[in-house]
Image (tube, helix red, strand yellow):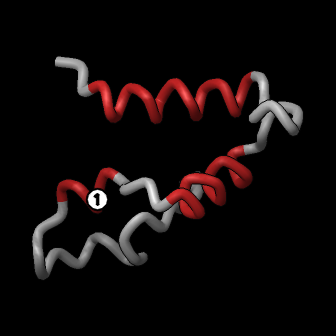
Amino acid sequence: MIYESEARIVRMVFAWYTKGDGENSPMPMSGIVNRLTEMGIPTFADKHSHEGDKRKKRGYGEWRRRL
């Protein structure tokens, strides 16, 4: 099943990574992470963690780059 709200974010991130955001050349992952955080886009853990779940280390909509 495709969730259009999530698919929209995936397409946006892909475009930023491959083409840029219209003002900048292709964006590095650190720039994409910063942009998603600025926009307050919820992370997977924001949507799927439960109260008391200690896996989420940052606040709601705060992204980080994973290695």
Find the residue positioned furthest to the left: 51
At which x and y percent is residue 36? 55, 53
Residue at (66, 47) in percent of width and height: 32
In the drawing, does residue 36 fall left or right of residue 34?
left
In the drawing, does residue 8 fall left or right of residue 38?
left
Q: Is residue 2 above or below residue 64?
A: above
Find the residue positioned furthest to the top: 1
Q: In this view, does 29 lie above or below 52?
A: above
Q: Mark 1: few, some, or many residues within 10 Å (few <14, many ≥20)?
A: some
Residue denoted by label 1: 45
Q: Is residue 50 above or below residue 25?
A: below
- Which type of secondary structure does the marked residue at label 1 adopt? helix
At which x and y percent is residue 8? 43, 28
Residue at (58, 34) in percent of width and height: 13
At which x and y percent is residue 39? 54, 57
Towards the viewer: 56 or 37: 37
Total residue callouts? 1
Residue at (28, 59) in percent of width and height: 45
In the drawing, does residue 13 fall left or right of residue 48?
right
Query: What is the three-letter code of the residue carrying label 1?
Result: Ala
Residue at (65, 59) in percent of width and height: 34
Towards the viewer: 57 or 46: 46
Q: Is residue 58 above or below residue 35?
A: below
Image quadrant occupied by the N terminus: top left
